Amino acid sequence: MGKYDDLVFTIPQEFHQWYGFARPRGFFRGTTMMPKAKLYMDFTAITKPQVMEVPHTHHAVDEYIVLATADFNNFFDGFDAEIDIWLGEDPERLEMHTVTEPSIVRIPPKLYHCPIHFRRVDKPVLFSAMYLDGDWSKITPLVNEEGKEEFKYDGAGIRRCVKDRSNECIYCGECFSKKMKEFEEGGKKEPPPHEEKLKPYIEMAKLPRTGNYDKYVYPYKPSYHDDSNFLNPRTGFRGLEEMEDSRLWYIQDIVSHECSVGELHMHHAVEEYLFFTGSDIAKFFEFDAEIEIMLGDDPDHMETYTITEPTVVRVPAGMWHGPVVFKRIGAPITFMPFYPNGRYGRVVRSPGGAAGYAYKGNDLPE
């Protein structure tokens, strides 16, 4: 047993019955899987057209929704879908945004969002909801039998099974899949039943747009480089450099050769999450690599951890870590450092062996 075993989590295979989702899928369910985690996110590959969710909001936490190709080996050219998502401050006056290229959508607190209509899916699509808290929750507006507005609260650990209220929901997808199979069968009819479900939102889309929410939908930009160890171009989302008020910074690298990445460092006040997965989310658990990472409370006392399966490593603020050594690469591996802050920064030992530390970050003056 290592001192930091609780920070290294092997992502389990989640076998489910969700209609139109690749299976098994990977899911990191925050504190239900790792105590003190402040991130909750999934890696879902959508394989069939469908309608997801109803308008809801999050009270105090940012969420980021990634809509991209599931095959990270072909991130920019492999997207072949049309997806509609509704955003707005009033659930009865939402504005529709159509995604036709890999994009990330920021959902700030109190912004209503959904439904999401996967209108056309000709290649598997990544749907990943990144929730910057360890306990996912949502608030959904409803009208009760008396005609009064209510707000339903739902969240991880409190949702009950639809079929048996005595049991906690385990997100098996059975109830959802039944509805979606009806959706698939109904799609052969004229008009399809989902058109009735979407009708109020389609009507909203006909109203004049304010454009106030366009700033929350950001198409990924390719980042070209000359490092042959990584797929070129790479991508990611660089927080405040790319979107005002963003609270997320991350890089997505596809590692194709044995190499060492990064340097020994720590983050003074922000924790970081390091994800290691297969490079095709539709085949999330096809993982053929051996990776080592060092963790420690101080740079002179480090422990080495070996990764051979899809894994997330939580790096608390003040913990020294790195470099990441990709010792063996049998197939391309996705390496994604998630930094829940708008700007990335790190603390390293002073160069030349001198006593003290130095700060490196993208918020320094040029």
Image (tube, grey):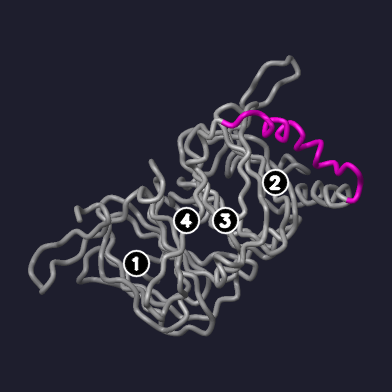
Tell whether label 1 touches label 3 (CB within 8 Å): no
For the residue labelled by badge 4, is the local secondary structure a helix, a strand or a loop?
loop
Magenta segment, which residues? 188-209
Front in this rendered view, residue 226 or 53: 226
Could you tell which of marks 1 and 4 lies nearer the N-terminus? 1
Separation (CA) of disc 3 from disc 2: 18 Å
105 left or right of 81 in image: left
What residue is drawn where x is 58% and y is 54%?
67
Mark 2 is on which residue type?
A: His
Disc with the residue nearer the chain's start (4 vs 3): 4
> Which of the two discs, 3 and 1, labels the residue nearer the N terminus?
1
Q: Which quadrant would the C terminus be assigned to in this image?
A: bottom left
| Inter-mark Cα distance, 4 to 2 | 32 Å
- Image depth: mark 4 or mark 2 in front: 2
The residue positioned 8% from the left and 70% from the top of the image is 354
For label 3, the residue is 42
Q: Which residue is mark 1?
A: 3
Q: Amino acid at mark 4?
A: Met
